[in-house]
Amino acid sequence: MTKHAGFPTDEAVTTVAAPAPAGLHFTPFPLPKVATRDCKKLAAVQVDIAAPAVAVGGSWFESMKASSPRRSADAEHGDWMEKHPSALTWFEAALGGAEGKQIVMFLDYDGTLSPIVEDPDRAVMSEEMRDAVRRVAELFPTAIVSGRCRDKVFNFVKLTELYYAGSHGMDIEGPANQSNKHVQANGGEAVHYQAGSEFLPVIEEMYRTLTAKMESITGAMVEHNKYCLSVHFRCVQEEEWNAVEEEVRSVLKDYPNLKLTHGRKVLEIRPSIKWDKGKALEFLLKSLGYAGRSDVFPIYVGDDRTDEDAFKVLRGMGQGIGILVSKFPKETAASYSLRDPAEVMEFLRKMVNPKGDGPEKMMT
């Protein structure tokens, strides 16, 4: 398998050039400019919200509405793909650094293993995807890292052999199946961690307040994810997006220990503690006995802004790869890309059977 060039470990959002043909050398390209898009097309293209609130000239909602995809979109997408090449097209190059090392898989759920849907309770995982994840987990320690409540993600995935990190990694549980070989390799000890348990009462209180506030905005929905709250506005009329933000901020000002972040047509409220998906990745690697080791190759696949914390950790480690699931250019610390959950499933299947010609397995 072709060896892949080392990943830079300096600035988290430094981009990596597309792997060059054999015998040629390549250098990193400058950071790409993110293509902006018309908000009226968001429902069809499912563009991530990747910008914080705008202090001058209106809110981040208004900034998103004002954006346009008309400026050299095709050329810009081509440039972006050179810097974040397809993990399928460049599979051998992407996985070259994993040769002789232990792969550990980290997978986001919404937008990665299941499509983004209007009703978050209907983000059902296909049986084909479940089978692909199951087969990967037979070979490599595998974790689902999601902003969702851990129990809710488990009910979607229904695989007991996985590690689950819910609420953006604040609620972690190891495999329920103690016969799992990866648990045995770690001495058979169960993995369990909860960050920010002291915030549970205030999260519950804010949930009740926000739910009452959102009743006046058609289509708005507050999802309780135990350690955090998700205010979904995918079904809200565009002209009321600002109203959603204003209501959330009006409530949040009374809770100085909570913070607001943005996702794909969702506002996330969570504790202001130094814990995120990147910290969850580090915790799980340590729990598996791989902290500080050079013979491990973590792979993190995610589509959301919150997954950037994990991509940055991999950049800092200089090990493994981050794979962004996106059809459109955006700033990211990931090294590679996949377009949608269908390509994620194809990538997972290739992880199990790289050549596609039989039961051959990858390195473990």
Image (cartoon, rainbow, N blue to C red):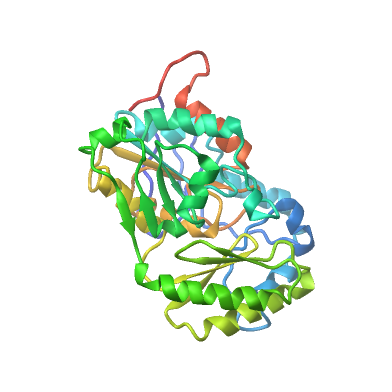
Q: Is residue 317 visible?
A: no
Name the quarter where the N terminus is drawn.
top left
Q: Position of residue 133 (x, y in %)?
A: 49, 34
Quadrant location of residue 2?
Answer: top left
Q: Position of residue 316 (x, y in %)?
A: 34, 55
- Name the residue located 38 percent from the left edge and 46 percent from the top edge: 7
Choose between 37 and 113: the one closer to the eye: 113
Q: Position of residue 313 (x, y in %)?
A: 37, 55
Q: Is residue 130 left or right of residue 183?
A: right
Relative vertical location of residue 322 with respect to residue 132 in this rendering, above or below: below
Name the quarter where the C terminus is drawn.
top left
Q: Position of residue 4 (x, y in %)?
A: 40, 35
Choose between 208 and 67: the one closer to the eye: 208
Quadrant location of residue 247?
Answer: bottom right
Q: How many labels sit on residues? A: 0
Choose between 43 and 15: the one closer to the eye: 43
- Name the residue located 47 percent from the left edge and 63 percent from the top edge: 226
